[in-house]
Structure formats: structure tokens, C-alpha cells
Image (cartoon, grey):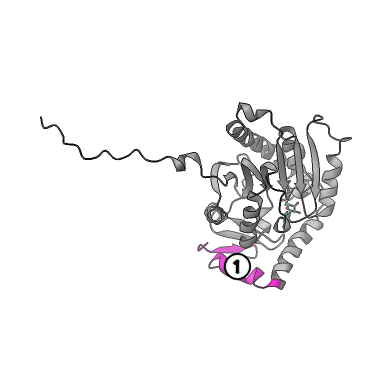
Amino acid sequence: MEVGGSDSDGREFKNAAEMWREEVGDHHKKTQWYTQGIGYWEGVEASEDGVLGGYGHVNDPDIKSSEAFLNTLLSDQFTDEKRNRHLAVLDCGAGIGRVTRNLLIRYFNEVDLLEPVSHFLEAAREKLAPEHLVVSDSHKASNFYCLPLQEFSPDSGKYDVIWVQWCIGHLTDDDFVSFFKRAKGGLKPGGLFVLKENIARAGFVLDKEDWSVTRSDSYFKELFQHCGLHIYKSKDQKGFPEELFPVKMYALTPDLPKWANRTRPKAQPNKPGIIK
Ligand SMILES: C[S@@+](CC[C@H](N)C(=O)[O-])C[C@H]1O[C@@H](n2cnc3c(N)ncnc32)[C@H](O)[C@@H]1O
């Protein structure tokens, strides 16, 4: 990413490489980067307001837009013969299980949660326990993995959707790319990633409070290329307070979209024209 960026103290960087060199340039700094990121969340209350940075009231518009987006994907991808199949999803950086509880568990038979902060994951486990939440006998939260994305590899071919919301900013570019490359193996054929993230207006913004990076749309697109992922669909989140970053949802596929395979009609060989 050649475009410059800044940090939350107003420091300017001429490009992302300069920022990453300073922040994670050697093994010690990289360990420190992840310790600080997780350390920030360890000090946050396990509540919707906590995981939403004091903006608990964006939960409703967030879930509504995500649900509409998910519905378009499910109706495209899961045609009639696939409609009755057992659907599985992985909720990454799941926090207290907000997205799982309000959305994913209603659509997927099996939800696994991945979250590195143990008091968040324990809160999720409790709220999703059958005695607190019953959707139906065939919908349940199954596995709770207390791990960060950069250390996780999913079981092969397990998930229809891998949902990554508001956590990828904690990963360095290298770990972003290697996470998605590994996680592709965790998708069923035809499966998709959904990435929902804050978007910087240009370049990137480093937040030195929670140790995350907000990337621009073109920064994301450059990383998707490195991951070997294609944008199947994308949609802007509407209805959030003005002072927040814009938010975008990307559905990503490891397969070449159908339109990319379509060959152009063969050029007509030169035929004698009729001279009138
Ligand atoms: C803004 S909260 C979002 C939580 C949840 N996705 C939601 O939308 O409610 C960010 C989450 O990312 C998690 N996180 C921080 N570093 C992470 C990492 N390296 N890998 C995975 N998750 C991480 C935090 O613990 C926190 O739960």
C-alpha cells in the first residue's frame, strides 16, 4: 500500500511499510503488538456497549444490515437442493458472541466462536448456553476457541461461511494474508468469507489505544489479491452515527466469480462484405 496514513496521535507515515516497520519490525515488537491489542480488550467490560466501543446502540442497525446481506448470499449460494443442508459458520473475533446471538445462530445449524479474550468468550458461552437461549434443537453454538486469528487454522472443509467482523484490524498485513490463505481450507465448496470492517477514507489509520489498523477500501482490495480472494458482493453499512468510520461488508470467495470465466464471443473471421 503506497498511500500514506496516520496514527491516532496525528503522526504521519509515508506508506504502510513504514508504519509496519516501526510497529512490528522485529520479533519482539510483533509480540508486543499482539499483547497490547489483546491487553486493551482484556480491560473492557463484557457487554455489547463494551465490544462496540461505547456505541451499544449501533447493534440494531448493524444486525439489520448484516442480516439483509447474509440473506442475499444464502439465496444466491444455497439453491433449493442445498437449502436443507446442515449449515456451519465460524464467528471470528466473536467478542461476547453478539453477532452469533443476534444473527448467525438463527441461520446456521452450528456456530463455532473464536475469541482470544477469555472473559469475552466465557460471557459468550454463558449467553449461548441452551438454558439461556433456545433457537431450535437443530441450531447450536458448538465450539468455543480461545485463540487469536493469527494462530488459528480451521478444520478442513467445515464451514459454509467464515464471518470476520471488527477484528481483522488487529492483524498485521502478513498475518492477514496467511490467516485467509489457511482459512480458505476451512470452507466447504462454494463457501464464503464475510468481512465486515471500518473503512479509512484513504490509506490507513493506526489506533494506538486498541492497537488496530483501519484500512481503506483499496488497501483491503490489495490484500484480498494477495490472499487469492475475489469480491463476490459488497455493501456499505447505512444508518451509523456520522462521527464513526464508514463500514463495509465484503463477501469473499476463493473461486473465480462466474463472470470471470465467461469467454468473449469469438471474433468473426474477415468475411467479404456485400457491396451494394
Ligand atoms: C470491536 S470487538 C468486536 C467483537 C465482535 N466481532 C462484534 O462485532 O461484536 C473486537 C474483538 O476483536 C478481538 N480481537 C482482538 N485481537 C484479536 C486477534 N488477534 N484475533 C482475533 N480477535 C481479536 C477482541 O478481543 C474483541 O473481541
**Above-or-below relation of 193 to 2:** above
Q: Position of residue 224 (x, y in %)?
A: 56, 53
Q: Which residues are magenta?
A: 1-27
254 within the magenta span = no
Q: Position of residue 230 (x, y in %)?
A: 54, 47
Query: Hey, which quadrant is residue 234 in on the image?
Result: top right
Name the residue nearer the viewer: 36 or 260: 260
Left or right of residue 234, residue 268 in this image: left
The residue that appears at 83% across and 54% down in the rendered structure is 118
Quadrant placement of the C terminus: top left
Question: What kind of element bears circle 1?
Answer: helix
| Residue topped by disc 1 | 19
9 within the magenta span = yes
Q: Position of residue 235 (x, y in %)?
A: 57, 41
Left or right of residue 267, residue 239 in this image: right
Confirm whether residue 244 shows in the render.
Answer: no
Query: How many numbered markers are drawn?
Result: 1
Q: Position of residue 113 (x, y in %)?
A: 76, 46
**Above-or-below relation of 156 to 110:** below
